[in-house]
Amino acid sequence: MTSVVATFYKFVKLPDFAEKREPLVSYCTEQAVKGTILLAKEGINGTIAGSRPGIDAVLSLIRSDPRFADLEHKESLVDTPPFDRLKVRLKSEIVTFGLPEADPSVQVGTYVSPRDWNDLIADPAVTVIDTRNDYEVSIGSFQGAANPQTRSFRQFPEYVRTHLDPAQHKKVALFCTGGIRCEKATAFMLAQGFEEVYHLKGGILKYLEEVPTDESLWKGECFVFDQRVAVQHGLEPGTHDMCRSCGHPISDEDKASPAYEEGIACPYCVDQLTEAKRIRQEARQQHIKFSF
């Protein structure tokens, strides 16, 4: 049965965010919708999957709050449900950045549509930066984009402080998976004195959905935070799996490596594989094997 995957976020003042959790849990469960929704005083962020009627119903419930009436979402179709369960969590931030002064409700960069993105990043005067983490960048990015080599989004401000200069980098273009990280990243950079800061509206996912392959400047696949692991142009499922030991995306080439043992280690984590961890991972593999 085909499932609809919907992703969405909105920054908005939400002082009553905790009160919204239980109604969302109840209604999503009623509609057999699974996935993850984060609620915080700064807004909502989610990726959910379910039937067409179920997804439509949940989105309608969220938009019934006037603060989310204009909530935008992106969606794709998958043959295998990408989530096993529902999680609706209360958080301090809907995307962890650690700097309250980076407030997208105050200011953000200039949105650029997927159709206009190629022209922007082809301009040699524009510094193009991938705001995602290193393991995400490793399987795909826009050609010519800088990789900050961060392990978490919290490290991005330090990258900006040490590698970028408002006096030198006059035009900066940022992109991320769905657009949410760029909201905070562009807000932060504007507060640091950068004058022209742009970001890809709808993120990589919207670009891959709207821009034809023969016109695309995207190379590789886009990591996503569900059981699909990665998607390609047209938001078709990608070719990567995920290492069950470290969570790094792995290709067929990685799985052909002598360092790869299914569920135990991969080329990206084999150096950190202790005997104690091997025992834990082997026990986990046995549990998985006998669960089917």
Image (cartoon, rainbow, N blue to C red):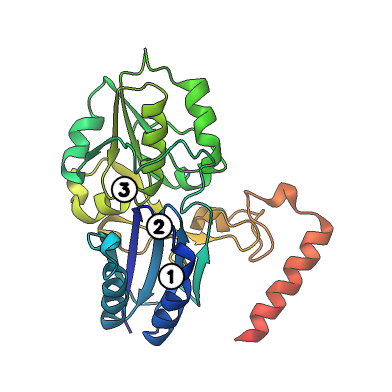
- Give the quarter of the image for residue 223: bottom left
Nearest to the eye among marks 2 and 3: give it. 2
In the shown orientation, is residue 120 left or right of residue 238? Answer: left
Tag 2: residue type? Leu
Front-most of 37 and 275? 37
Q: Mark 2 or mark 1, which is nearer the start of the sequence?
A: 2
- Give the quarter of the image for residue 74: bottom left
Q: Do the residues labelled 1 and 2 touch (CB within 8 Å)?
A: yes
- The residue indicated by pointer 3 is 203
| Position in image of residue 281 (x %, y %) | 73, 66
Q: Is mark 3 on a helix, strand or loop?
A: helix
Q: Mark 3 or mark 1, which is nearer the start of the sequence?
A: 1
Kindly identify which numbered label has been placed on residue 14.
2
Picture layout, residue 191 above or below residue 165: below
Kindly identify which numbered label has been placed on residue 20.
1
In the shown orientation, is residue 173 left or right of residue 103? Answer: left
